[in-house]
Image: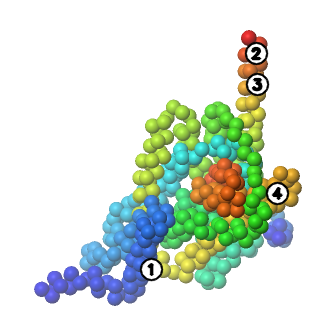
Amino acid sequence: MFLHALQSTGDFSIQSLQKMDLWAQGLFVVVIGLIGVFLVLTLFFFTIVIMQKIAEAAKKSKTVKADAAE
Amino acid sequence: MIEVLKEILNGFVYFGQGDNWKALIMYLIGGLLIYLAIKKEYEPALLLPIGFGAILVNLPLSIAGEPTTIAGVLDTAAESGFLKILFDAGIATELFPILIFVAIGAMIDFTPLFKNPYMIFFGAAAQFGIFVTFFVTLMLLPLVVPGMDNTYALKLASAIGIIGAADGPTTLFVANHFKLAEYLGPISVAAYSYMSLVPIIQPPVIKLLTSKKERMIRMDYHEEPVSKSIKVVFPILVTIIAGVIVPMSVPLVGSLMFGNLIRESGVLENLSQTAQHELANLITLLLGITIGSTMVADKFIDPVTGMILLLGLFAFVFDTAGGVIFAKILNIFLKKKINPMIGAAGISAFPMSARVIQKMAKKEDPTNFILMQAISANVAGQLGSIVAGGLVIALIDMLIKVG
């Protein structure tokens, strides 16, 4: 809906957002805010997963080296 | 003699002048907060100082012959009292909420989240209430306060919505960022009171949205060790990611993660303990009484205050609902079902919300243990609420910036 409001103003600049009705601005904050929270936490999720993979790989290579030394 | 008597009775005369009788209502409100803190043990560390501050700031005191409030915060005092000095130093500068986050960071153990990383999404879903409340407030404000400027409505709606973060310092940070000093009192009281009422607010909402069968779902928990390097690197990476994507959240994320890094480094045990105890206690004490000092009668007794208190509750209810509904949606696609109650723990009230969920699970099935999963979601809620706060500030600033 806020996209319609945006389109009616002709462009997607910050100025066009500022010219929108109050409800459209509200809806913009709701949609972008929720997407933003999910996006940032998704990045945190991948950060944890990647860190775990790296730690696992490091542990494995350590074990292999220790086995080889034996 | 008459002059002396007049001077002595000046305090009583004060209540009969204009709207000064409202101060008496503030004594009752302050007393109620102190009662809830002592008798019911609802967030006593905050509600007690807030309640006392509310009484203190509404006492009549004649300064330079002019009846005014003691140590008034909102430019009513002839000279700065200690509460105004505290307000200017700790709240207006956003220092107290930031320092509280250092303490919270030192208290948080992210290990359960590392064991269940997918739980982080509940920390996002449970921020639903913030945004719904923001929108509802924005629609209601022109009706409650006709003629309110759109810019002010956006600022106030965002501060009211963020009560749903269930995170007092973030709520304060957002309200203060938008210079809403006159509503800081009711906003903080709502945030901290509802946080302490989580055991009362959440269960009925969860029960309404879930079946007994769903509440009895068991979840696996893998007790694998988490390496120290992950615990140390995580706060650094999170700060960088948040800083790049949501720069407005850096003061909050940065201080939280700084506290957590102190904890996890393993070489700053004294600092970690100081942050968790002395720093947390000292700032909480000063924060509480300073917030209380914003509760000046003529600003507090206002239709908007009632609206803030009601919508704050609304935000908590929708946060809980958002988390539960998100878990139920996930269950449609998952083979191994999630107990949907876990979703409700995605709010920031840590560890109270996780405990409530475990208690509910145990009530349905005494052998069901989902505490660790609930704590994972609860810890994720800490991150989610800060990110939501930063995003709300960034988006509102963008909308109100003079083009």
Tell me the kind of residue under disc 4.
Leu
Q: Chain of mark 1?
A: B
Q: Which residue is mark 3?
A: A60
Colour mapping: rainbow
Q: Chain of mark 2?
A: A
Q: Is residue B375 left or right of residue B117?
A: left
Q: Nearer the viewer, residue B234 or B216?
A: B216
The location of residue A27, given as percent across then percent down, is: 75, 69
Q: Which mark is residue B298?
A: 1
Residue at 53 percent of width and 38 percent of height: B262
Q: Which residue is mark 2?
A: A67
The location of residue B356, given as percent across then percent down, is: 62, 60
Task: Compute the Cα span from label 2 to label 4.
Answer: 43 Å
Whether marks 1 and 4 lie on the same chain:
yes
Task: Compute the Cα span from label 4 to label 3.
Answer: 33 Å
Whether marks 2 and 4 lie on the same chain:
no
- Observer-side mark, 2 or 3, equals 2
Sequence-wise first label, 1 or 4? 1
**A57 above or below B402?**
above
Q: Which residue is mark 4?
A: B330
Q: Which element type, helix, strand or loop, lies under badge 2?
A: helix
Q: Mark 1 Cα within 10 Å, few/some/many (few <14, many 20+)?
A: some
Tell me the kind of residue under disc 3.
Lys
Task: Compute the Cα span from label 1 to label 4.
Answer: 48 Å
